[in-house]
Image (spheres, rainbow, N blue to C red):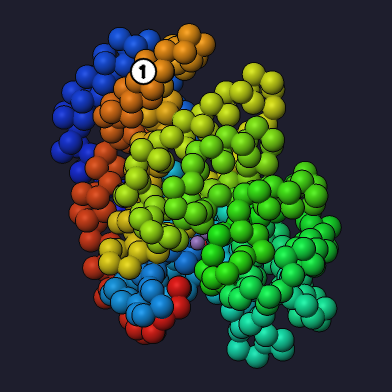
Amino acid sequence: RHLSALPQDVIDAENDKLMAAHLYDYESLRVRLERSDVDIETVVRRLMTLEVGLPSWGMISGGTRFARFPMPGEPNNIFEKIEDCAAVHQIAGMTPRISLHFPWDVTYDYTEVRQYAEAYGIGFDAVNSNTFQDQPGQTLSYKYGSLSHTDRATRQQAIEHNLECIEIGQKLGSNALTVWLSDGTNFAGQAQFAETLERYLDSMTEIYAALPDDWRVFLEHKLYEPAFYSTVIQDWGTSILCAQQLGPKAQCLVDMGHHAPNVNIEMIVARLAQFGKLGGFHFNDSKYGDDDLDAGSINPFQLFLIFNELVHAEERAAKRGAAFDPSYMMDQSHNVTDPMESILNSARAIGGAYAKALIVDRAAMAAYQDANDVMMGHNCLRLAFETDVRPALAEARRRKGGAIDPMAAFRATGYRAEKARARQPRRAERGGIC
Ligand code: LRH
Ligand code: MN
Ligand code: MN
């Protein structure tokens, strides 16, 4: 048994209040799905296997380059972030890991951090390197790049930072490194595209060579920001080319906000999966750019279509006896909401998109596709998307000891108010993303 971050009796009491209505709703959905030959039990069991990592940097109030408005009771250090992660996991039952970012999460004793997390039943997701900022006391600057810098010594410094992240990750029991590279240019003529990418690949080859046997490295592409004319790993094309050149442990990571407007992200997912290069996700949502809004809050249909591809890819891989194991994470910035509440809502959106993808009648859809019945093929997706799957999700949470109504249960625990009394208030730093 693990330590509980939240009083379990409060969650149970909240569930008791909702149980009769929940059973009624669950039975209605069961009957509704049975009509389409979908077994709700199978859906619930698969939902119970869904795991999404939480970003350590998303556990505190985010900010823009203009301001950050911290809220009372937010975590001040890695231990408090782990505690919040455990609390979210207790309610949502699908966020068992935290993803650390270095040097933001640098601490003196990783064994202590690991033991603390283990006591709460929390593990460690991919470790993230950071060569997009200069740290106090850093010898060489990343102003003009890091792993792709023209200066060999600066590249070496960035390589060593990534090697250190792998070492820390090993101490924590993590098994992946995510490299998001902000290197790029603001002006045409500032750098040569080809040579820059060559230097990046040389650096990554050294990092790749240091990966333990059971590790993966995720290449996270991003179209723009902070560089506004060109980015070295700007899209999934460059990302997959590099992953293919580096080797089987290198895969692509899709952050949903890192694409040009209107890009068909679900299709990128299908392509990467087909070629064994889909490493994982940073779930979030956006209206304009890399907005890092809550998953499913702007375009839930897109999230569903992504899960539709994931379920299809999972089933294709199963038929071939191949592994399909993308690593799911959130990467969100919570500027005006309680981060824990935003994460609870995002977990619901992600789980809901998965549930809807699981109830798509794939045999019927394939038949319509073969017959070129466009409208009916499309309607197979529409029907699943329009189905209210919340009772199946609630049941999956409940069976794991979580909450039928996550937000009501979280508020009933009074967790944040208690932390506001117990934790040091954070400074209202100006700017920055974390
Ligand atoms: C870059 C990014 C990347 C970073 C995180 C803080 O925009 O998505 O994943 O590590 O934000
Ligand atoms: Mn990201
Ligand atoms: Mn981002």
Q: Quadrant of residue 115?
A: bottom right
Identify the residue shown where x is 28% and y is 26%. 387
**Residue 341 left/right relative to 119:** left
The spot of residue 301 in percent (x, y) is 36, 38
Amino acid on which disc 1 is placed? Met
Q: Residue furthest front?
A: 189
Say if 178 sits above or below 405 in the image: below
Front-lying residue, 34 or 153: 153
Measuring 73% from the left and 49% from the top, which residue is drawn there?
A: 241
x and y percentages locating residue 53 in the rendered image: 50, 51
| Left or right position of 158 against 430 | right
The residue closer to the viewer here, 7 or 141, is 141
- In depth, the one of 375 and 241 nearer the eye is 375
User: Residue 249 at what x, y percent from top left?
Assistant: 75, 47
Residue 56's place in the image compared with 377, above or below, is: below
**Quarter location, residue 18:** top left
Provide the secondary structure element on which disc 1 rests.
helix
Task: Name the residue tied to disc 1.
Answer: 375
Report the residue at 54% width, 70% height from top: 228
